[in-house]
Image (cartoon, rainbow, N blue to C red):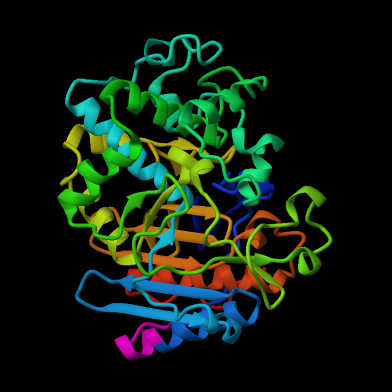
């Protein structure tokens, strides 16, 4: 998912917690960032982070690197959360659908090695697992043009998403849930974000390599890049100091949230539920990676500079399809990554949402400039119409300002805030 000035991508169903993006009309939040010194940038972004906390976010981490040695690092948290933990910029964080960029990287590495081809039909690697699998290619899975129904929209997943069912899910099990439903359209004819695509990708990676996505992330990405706090979660275990994630408890959940998505499992805290220890394995290859803002910046730098992929495969990753009908020159989705032109520059990015954790990681085309905005709650992005508008506005304003700070430019002023 991508959320930046000029493009707002959000989610609106509980079972889409790994994130189904929906582009909304252009709306550039008025931002207070106005360039200047590093101290000024920090103060201005901190003001926006505080507004987001005041609007209802339990905690916010901001890290912005302008590529010229100036790194802004900010944490803000609601007072009631400090009894549980002190939020740090280096805290481990569930990255949700940002996972897709890493999964696509793994696939493209194997393409570069001749072990996979983007034209391979799903049927070649998962025979009998996907209806019409002969017509769905690996490329269609990676860029969400397969037409497969999103498995996280099936209510079978809701108990796991809410933390009430702590079973461990496999890629094949998640895929089986998704393909029980009719496809949304014929393969290759439209674009629709579906986590089932990446459940299939996870299963294919296992079939081709004989290794789990967790092992592949560790050995092909995290260890080579020295990402000490990046790993693929297979259960509720954290490896290091981590951000606590929260959602409103049932009594404080806005009435517009459906009954089946209101009651999260976990310890209760000041009208919220701490969901940090719930099992995220249901997200799998669609959204189970844990990382930090600093690690993700290093990943983006290595990815965009060609350290992880040969030039041909990086070009394939950055070959996009339109995500908004009727806007062929609008935002696009490549292989596991979004792109959009913002008022301050072109970004490559993904957004992730999983209970308790909402993230936007963005970079410029070179990987030298990066921005991460990590928020320790997620339901308001799932149900934007149910929650007060103030929190979404504060969220969008912070993200827009961080993107512009990444380019060392002032965010546009005088634009509408809604």
Vertical placement of residue 86 versus 193, above or below: below
Residue 217 located left or right of residue 248: left
Residue 147 location in percent, x, y?
57, 24
Give percent across and percent down for residue 300: 28, 54
User: Of residues 135 and 232, which is closer to you in this image?
Assistant: 232
Q: Residue 32: where, in percent of width, then height?
A: 50, 83
Give 273 or 309, whichever is nearer the viewer. Answer: 273
Q: How many marks?
A: 0
Quadrant of the drawing holding the C terminus: bottom right
Q: Is residue 312 left or right of residue 277?
A: left
Relative to 289, does residue 36 appear above or below in the rendering? below
Specify whether 282 is left or right of 334: right
Residue positioned 48% across, 51% down in the render: 96
Q: Is residue 35 inside the magenta stretch?
A: yes
Q: Is residue 365 visible?
A: yes
Residue 375 is left or right of residue 301, and the answer is right
In front of the other: 333 or 60: 60
* Corner quadrant of residue 297: bottom left
Q: Can residue 262 be found in the magenta stretch?
A: no
Instruction: Please tell me which residue is depicted at 46% across the width and 40% down the height of the picture.
Output: 284
Position above or below: 22 against 108: below
Of residues 389 and 56, the one nearer the viewer is 56
In which quadrant of the rendered view does residue 103 lie? top left
Q: Position of residue 355 (x, y in %)?
A: 58, 56
Question: At 41% from the left edge and 42% from the top edge, which residue is drawn?
Answer: 100
Quick check: can you spot residue 329? no
Identify the magenta region. Answer: 33-42
Image point (37%, 44%), residue name: 101
């Amino acid at each position: 998912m991508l959320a930046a000035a000029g493009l707002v991508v959000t989610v609106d169903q509980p079972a889409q917690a790994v994130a189904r993006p929906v582009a909304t009309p252009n709306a550039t939040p008025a931002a207070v960032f106005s360039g200047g010194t590093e101290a000024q940038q920090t103060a201005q972004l901190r003001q926006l982070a505080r507004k987001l906390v005041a609007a209802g976010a339990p905690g916010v981490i901001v890290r912005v690197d302008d590529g010229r040695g100036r790194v802004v690092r900010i944490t803000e948290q609601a007072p009631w959360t400090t009894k549980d933990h002190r939020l740090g910029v280096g805290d481990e964080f569930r990255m949700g659908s940002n996972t897709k960029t890493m999964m696509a990287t793994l696939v493209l590495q194997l393409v570069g090695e001749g072990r996979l081809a983007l034209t391979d039909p799903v049927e070649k690697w998962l025979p009998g697992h996907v209806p019409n699998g002969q017509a769905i290619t690996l490329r269609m899975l990676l860029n969400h043009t397969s037409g497969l129904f999103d498995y996280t929209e099936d209510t079978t997943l809701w108990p796991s998403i809410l933390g009430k069912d702590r079973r461990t899910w496999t890629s094949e099990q998640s895929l089986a849930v998704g393909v029980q439903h009719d496809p949304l359209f014929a393969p290759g004819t439209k674009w629709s974000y579906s986590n089932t695509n990446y459940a299939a990708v996870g299963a294919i990676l296992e079939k081709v390599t004989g290794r789990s996505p967790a092992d592949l992330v560790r050995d092909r990405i995290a260890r080579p890049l020295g990402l000490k706090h990046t790993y693929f979660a297979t259960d509720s275990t954290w490896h290091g100091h981590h951000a606590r994630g929260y959602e409103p408890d049932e009594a404080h959940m806005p009435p517009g949230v459906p009954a089946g998505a209101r009651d999260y499992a976990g310890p209760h805290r000041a009208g919220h539920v701490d969901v940090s220890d719930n099992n995220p394995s249901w997200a799998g290859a669609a959204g189970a990676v844990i990382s930090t803002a600093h690690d993700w910046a290093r990943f983006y730098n290595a990815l965009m500079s060609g350290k992880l992929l040969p030039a041909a495969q990086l070009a394939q990753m950055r070959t996009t399809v339109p995500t908004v009908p009727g806007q062929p020159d609008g935002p696009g989705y490549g292989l596991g990554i979004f792109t959009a032109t913002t008022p301050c520059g072109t970004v490559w990015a993904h957004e992730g949402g999983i209970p308790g954790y909402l993230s936007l990681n963005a970079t410029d085309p070179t990987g030298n400039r990066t921005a991460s905005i990590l928020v320790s709650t997620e339901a308001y992005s799932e149900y934007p119409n149910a929650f007060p508008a103030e929190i979404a506005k504060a969220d969008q304003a912070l993200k827009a300002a961080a993107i512009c700070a990444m380019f060392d430019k002032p965010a546009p002023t005088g634009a509408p805030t809604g």
